[in-house]
Amino acid sequence: MPYHYLLFGLFYLISSCSSNDNPFSYGNDTHSRGNMNIYVEGSFKPLFDTSINTFEGQYPKAKISAVFGSEDEIIDAFFKDSTKTICISRDFTKEEKSALKKKKVEVRSDKIAEDAIALILHPSNPDSLMTIQQIKDIILGKTTHWPGLKIKINVVFDKQNSANFNYLKKLCDLNKLPINLFAMNSNEEVINFVKKNKSAIGIIGLNWISDSDDFDTLGFVDGINVVAIAKDDKSDYFKPHAGYIFTREYPFFREIWLINKAKKSGVNTGFVLFMKGEKGQLIVQKSALVPANAPVRLIQLITE
């Protein structure tokens, strides 16, 4: 066989393999095709379970593997290059960005939503209205018993180094874990513990109880009360609904960020663009969180 015919045959074979989704072909990893992993803070698991299922349903040639963990562990994994895309409750600090820049790593940060810390109680607990200062006093162990129940308070959260715990540390300027503060293993475990214990106050990510159309969420909400919080004893009390998060009337709000260092043409970036785009933002809105790139309708009800 002449040499040029052999070259043509090889070129045809490679082209055929590419058209049949050969995993080694150039261009296999695009915005809508390829494999990726993403590390997600456990507070946002319900949102990302839905988002990933929707993305893979829209793009059947894309496969996303999600690892859910604590915020500090996720950031550590990003710096160790265990993953190229993460979701946490904040953007990187100047120091973190500078460290990555020194390694010549290009990082893109995108805020995709706002959510909140929610405080939950057993239904028998009548103390469901609290000010920020009252909450701080409970967390710091200054208030040790429930006034309405006359029993000792147990404060439970998901795990150390999580986004929820980091929020508490910043709120109360914690240097060490108070003796009345107990770590579980997940937001779900916190919810189940509060359902069984009258003495408990649970600290969870709002996303676990926000979507009233989700069957699993309804199961979590059944058997708990959500605390309404006021900025001080002269202010109104608000529960963590999207409208009150948007207006900052509910004080324990925070953000949801996607941070990505994968190539701009790959599926990692495609998923980030999906979450920033109309469909991703609609999922955020349906989850009863605040979309970053879409307006929130505020409806004022006037009763006579």
Image (cartoon, grey):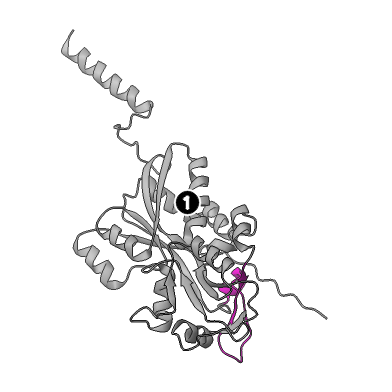
What residue is disc 1 on? 274
Can you say whether 61 is above or below 9 in the image? below
Can you say whether 56 is above or below 258 in the image? above
* Image-quadrant location for residue 78: bottom left
Q: Residues within 10 Å of mark 1 (few under 14, many from 20)?
A: some
Q: Nearer the viewer, residue 248 or 133?
A: 133
Q: Nearer the viewer, residue 191 or 238?
A: 191
Residue 16, percent from left and from top: 34, 22
Residue 101 horizontal side relative to residue 84, left or right: left
Residue 225, percent from left and from top: 63, 71
View extreme (right): residue: 304
Can you say whether 35 is above or below 161 in the image? above
Residue in the image at 56% along x and 82% along y: 151
Residue 285, percent from left and from top: 58, 60
Quarter of the image that includes the N terminus: top left
What range of the chain is rendered magenta? 224-247
Residue 140, percent from left and from top: 43, 84
Can you say whether 256 is above or below 277 in the image? below
Residue in the image at 63% along x and 58% along y: 218
Residue in the image at 43% along x and 40% along y: 62
**Amino acid marked by disc 1:** Phe
Magenta span includes 229: yes
Magenta span includes 121: no
